[in-house]
Amino acid sequence: MRQEELQDLLNSMSLQEKIDQMLQLTGDFYEDADSVMTGPAGELGVSEEDIRMAGSILGTAGAKKLKHIQKNYMEKQPHHIPMLFMMDVIHGMKTIFPIPLGQGATFEPELSRKCAQAAAKEAAVSGLHVTFAPMADLVRDARWGRVMESTGEDTYLNGLFAAAMVKGFQGDDLSSPEQVAACVKHFAAYGGAQAGRDYNTVELSEHTLREYYLPAYKAGIDAGAALVMTSFNTVNGIPASTNEWLMRHILRDEMGFDGVLISDFSAILETVAHGYAKDSREAAVKALEAGVDIDMMTNVYAANLKKLAEEGSVPISLIDQCVMRILELKNKLGLFENPYKGADEEKEKEVILCKEHRALAREAAVKSFVLLKNDGILPLDMEKRTAFIGPFTDDKQIKSSWSFTGDDKDCVTIKEAAENVFDSRRTTYLKGAPVIGADSRLIGFKLAGFQEDAPKEITAEEERQMLCEAIEAAEKADVVIMPLGEHYLQSGEATSRGEITVPEVQMELFRAVRAVNPNIVVVLFSGRPLDIREISKKARAVLEVWRPGTEGGNAIVDVLTGKADPSGKLPMSFPYCVGQVPVHYNEFFTGRPNRKGMQERFRSRYIDIPNAPLYPFGYGLSYTDFSVSSVTLDKEEMGPEDIIRAGVRIKNTGTRSGTETVQLYLRDTVASVVRPVRELKGFEKVTLEPGEEREIVFTIDESMLRFHTEKNGFASETGDFLVFIGTDSTTENQAHFCLCR
């Protein structure tokens, strides 16, 4: 449809019809097989007419179902405008890939693009048009449950992944039957919630907001994201969904975003609870003035905008702007020509969980795993007696709370994968303990629809019996593999944790097994960095596998047995303990830095724990060893138009093939604003055979030296810079150059 035709359509719509395009409801309102039902209309405060005319639905999928809803909707819609179907397809539709934090650990944005492309294909054949992904929030506080949806603590890395995921979901043509529209979220700074507590206040300086939090969103927008979602939090005292400065000045004007802006679930109405809007009427005015196009699951727009416009309290032109953006999105998706787009029951059978997608899920999982410790016990000696002891040994709940479109039954467990490889005569499999005990709280999950997934209660006697069987098996084994970690409902939305530890019932199992067999390999399942001091100290090896997805079991066995080499790198620091949180590698220098070996009291440090995290950003081991040469520069001075080539030689000094990620960090030594101790500016993954050596060269240009100055926006300043090249963020392998004018 041409732009003039869209304008004609808009002009012909009634005011109420326009406003209903701005309303999004859940699929609960449309669950009747023959007609649109009111569902919980009374509770929400929307009319049956609003439900019948709402412009979009979230949370419902399936080609047959959605085609039926679309047909009914368009028949009753005065102008036969198609409905939008949206869903949280975060890290897979039916084929579930590693959580985004795990994908960040791959340091392969292109791999994430492929995963998003596969997810889009499965979502599209299921009738969906929009996914609420990627999440571009910068995360530094592991207490926040939603760190699992981010790709980590680094601005540069997050931007690369956000762009890659947008391109994967959307492709080159949104009207393609295999693509869906991406929605960058949560705008803005949701990852900075105080105390790591979900939905909490965010207080940031404008400098920090602009330099560290906003760039990843912009990367997704620059990649062509069709939608942006507002965040729940306040930003410096103003709720994001009604923050005109944030949404119009920064998002629209500065970043040039001209797509659809959608609120998060009930976020506009929640401005009343924030104490920023007096009532829903005032919330409607402020959200509209901020430029929010779609009100997700409240009646704020539906109940108030018509009267507000008729009495002149809001200009109809603002409503028209919102509706035009919605119509333009539907047009870009090709829905006016084909309202059913890619929805196809037969293709669902062909595409969903196809061989190619499962293979990609397995590859992504393998590359996401981070080997945190290994004293030589891995890869496993297959001739030894092996006991798998831990609650995740044969657990199919290895996806995440944000992969509800997938089915646990489709997941491959460790036991299922191991039985295809290990000699049954020398291998045992035991649970050993429940995932969580009575000391762990999962508040409200039964009310949120997770009744079936909530942990089953067991008696104290049953727990003792499980432990006794585990100890007996451990005593007879040469090596014990212990799959431990968080219950999947302990990470994700509304899962902030004050103690980010492995549940105590599992730690009791770990200690009991360790007492009879020190040859322990911990396979760690988590949606966030955890405090694993005790495990790290006492286990011989630790393999972080995140929430690995559908092919998790196969991928884990691939790495344990040496079929695949671990190559993941931490996208987020693992704290020494929760008292360090938030902790991140790119901190600022202080006036009293705590340098290595200093004994002086009056320094910026803890008196009881180290400053450094247990495992830093960019860290991860391999089954082989690598050496990295000193940094060489082709020049020591550069002008604004020049480049510097910084190189190292990396050599596989071990006996196995392996993959290493060479990382480039820069430090601005003196600037008008205090700069971080170092910042990631590039990386390259390289696979080398034993004895093989290769030169890695990074190109440094002036744009990489820019930062948010107090006077000139993003700009570089003349002066001295340090170049660090190594295999994690703590490298001291450095060289020096100067930027001159």
Image (cartoon, helix red, strand yellow):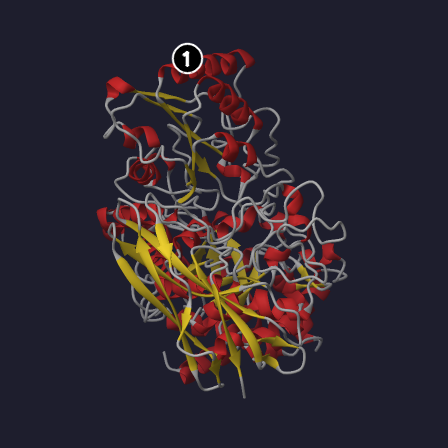
In the displayed structure image, the side of residue 239 where residue 398 appears, left or right: left
**Percent position of residue 389, x then y:** 41, 23
Quarter holding the N terminus is bottom left
In the displayed structure image, the side of residue 222 where residue 459 appears, left or right: right
In the displayed structure image, the side of residue 627 where residue 273 appears, left or right: right
The amino acid sitting under disc 1 is Glu
Residue linked to disc 1: 472
- Residue 5 lies, with reference to residue 164, above or below; the image says below
**Percent position of residue 584, x then y:** 58, 54
The kind of secondary structure element at disc 1 is helix
The foreground one among 265 and 148 is 148
The foreground one among 28 and 293 is 293
Residue occupying image coordinates x 62% and y 26%: 439
The foreground one among 332 and 83 is 332
**Percent position of residue 495, x then y:** 59, 42
- Residue 390 lies, with reference to residue 15, above or below; the image says above
**Percent position of residue 214, x then y:** 57, 68
**Is residue 131 among the parts visible in the rendering?**
yes
Residue lying furthest bottom: 741
The foreground one among 195 and 92 is 195
Residue occupying image coordinates x 54% and y 38%: 490
In the displayed structure image, the side of residue 262 where residue 329 appears, left or right: left
